Amino acid sequence: MSQIQIVEDQMKKVIQKLQADFSAMRTGRAHISLVEGLKVEHYGSVMPLNQVASLAIVDGRSIEIKPWDKEALKPIETAILKSDLGMTPLNDGKLLRLTMPAPTTERKKEIIRLLHKQSESFRVMVRNVRRDAVEALKKEEKDKKISQDDLRRSEQQVQKLTDQYVKTVDDLLATKELEVLEV
């Protein structure tokens, strides 16, 4: 595998991590990722919520949790109440419904500030991948494994990838910002 392919794979992983972090961030819009990992104690064992119930988005602001076993309804409700979600589920005896509260203007500003801070750390991660790749390329050139022309060409390719992935971070940030302001 060439150095360029390694760099691209590492940058893709950074973007995947950013997407996962953004999807888990509470914006006032309902996302399954907010609750699917909640630990539920049921029949003496602790399992993620998505293994004891089906989860669905009813509208943009509500999550419906339908346990496969009615006996799991109370433990699921307890797990939600103990979590840091800050929401109280509505229990109708068959399923639970979580309604996302609309964030205040102040909370939206706070979320956007956090998004910008998080995005900057991911831009730094992309640049760190670039720095490591350039160092590796310079070492290869020093060890006479590649020529100076190959070094320059490879550095340019790494820089193009860096620019591309930093732009992807910026695009993801802009999309998430719109989502936050829209709610």
Image: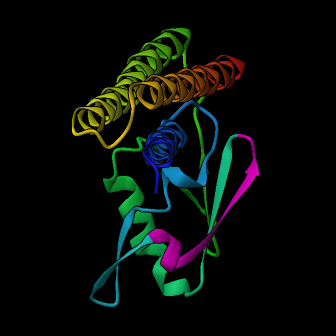
| Residue at the spot 46% in from the left edge and 31% down from the top edge | 150
Q: Quadrant of residue 86?
A: top left
Instruction: Count how many numbered circles sit on residues in the image.
Output: 0
Where, quadrant-wise, is the C terminus in this rendering?
A: top right
At horizontal 48% and vertical 41% (from top left) the residue drawn is 4
Q: Quadrant of residue 139?
A: top left
Q: Is residue 115 left or right of residue 129?
A: right
Against 152, residue 83 (above or below) is below
> Which residue is pictured at 52% across the width and 44% down the height?
12
Of residues 173 and 76, which is closer to you in this image? 173
Residue 126 drawn in magenta: no
Residue reaching furthest to the right: 59
In-front residue for pair 118/123? 123
- Magenta stretch bounds: 49-60
What x and y, as percent, mark residue 32?
59, 55
Q: Position of residue 96 (x, y in %)?
A: 59, 63
Task: Report which quarter residue 116 is drawn in.
Answer: top left
Estimate the x, y position of residue 135 in percent, counting from the top left.
Answer: 26, 30
